[in-house]
Image (tube, coloured by chain):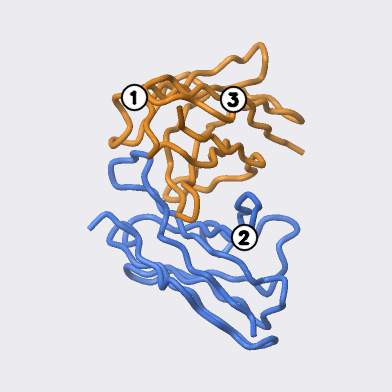
Chain colours: A orange, B blue
Amino acid sequence: QVQLQESGPGLVKPSETLSLTCTVSGGSISGSYWAWIRQPPGKGLECIGYIYHSGSTKYNPSLKSRVTISLDTSKNQFSLNLSSVTAADTATYYCARHERYSHYDWFDPWGQGILVTVSS
Amino acid sequence: SSELTQDPVVSVALGQTVTISCQGDRLRTFLASWYQQKAGQAPVLVIYGNNYRPSGIPDRFSGSNSGNTASLTITGAQAEDEADYYCFCRDISDNPVVFGGGTKVTVL
């Protein structure tokens, strides 16, 4: 079965770039859609962006100017870069497979999540 | 509104039935998926599409959709069902968006 694992630094300084990688095991990253989702401490879930197997992307409009999601099929990984971070970007970041059908979507499975704190 | 609205807190007696609702205009066009998140854990998909349950999810979980409302029902709630539940639905523009605000289910 497909499993996902996030990796990256747990502490990022304000104004710097947050960089995370999601490694997919138990299946190929090709032929599927993938997503990054975050959850600030004590708050709800927010989709950051999607990347399709073709490499095309969609980003949350509120984050679009700062977000880049990319795919590395050779390593079976996809990555998130979020630039110019502030304390408001402190959150647990999850990667997930994004499944789509004609008029519904779902996210399954999810990685375990990684807490990223923005602080000097 | 493009938002999805959920009741913040719901309680249910052990063994009884509870229904969680999710309201939003885009639910008139797209179907919801539902996620269970226990304290300190990643969300887990429990319902998607027309009441489909992933493998391993107990059949006491069911979903329905009507008009601008999606519902998740737990029939015969168990202590282990105590968690936060989030709904999600595709945005009309297909942009990544926020989930519903979440419902904390307490089993008494």
Instruction: State the residue lying farthest toward the front.
Output: A120
Residue A58 relative to residue B107: left or right: left
Q: Nearer the viewer, residue A108 or A86?
A: A86
The subunit letter for the residue under badge 2 reads: B
Determine whether the residue tagged by mark 2 lies in a helix, strand or loop.
strand
Seen from the viewer's position, the closer of residues B82 and A96 is: B82
Side of B76 where B70 appears, left or right: left
In the drawing, what numbered circle is on residue A120?
A: none
Q: Nearer the viewer, mark 2 or mark 1?
A: 1
Mark 1, residue position:
A66
Label 3 is placed on what type of residue? Answer: Pro
**Real-space Cα distance between discs 2 and 1?**
32 Å
Q: Is residue B93 above or below residue B28?
A: above
Asked if labels 3 and 1 share a chain, the reply is yes
- Mark 1 is surrounded, within 10 Å at the Cα level, by few (under 14), some (14 to 19) or many (20 or more) other residues, namely some
Chain ID, mark 3: A
Residue A56: x, y in percent? 42, 21
In the image: residue A3, left or right of residue B96: right
Q: Quadrant of the C terminus of chain A?
A: top left
Where residue A111 sits in the image (x, y, percent)? 65, 39
Q: What's the CA distance linking mark 2 and mark 3? A: 30 Å
Q: Amino acid at mark 1?
A: Arg
Residue that mark 3 sits on: A9
Residue B46 sits above or below residue A2 on the image:
below
Foreground disc of the pair 2, 3: 3
Kind of element beneath mark 3 = loop
Residue drawn at (61%, 22%), measured in percent from left and top? A30
Q: CA distance from mark 3 to mark 1?
A: 18 Å
Q: Pinpoint residue A64: horizontal percent, then vertical percent.
A: 31, 28
The residue pinned by badge 2 equals B46
Crowd band around label 3 with a 10 angstrom C-alpha radius: few (<14), some (14–19), many (20+): few
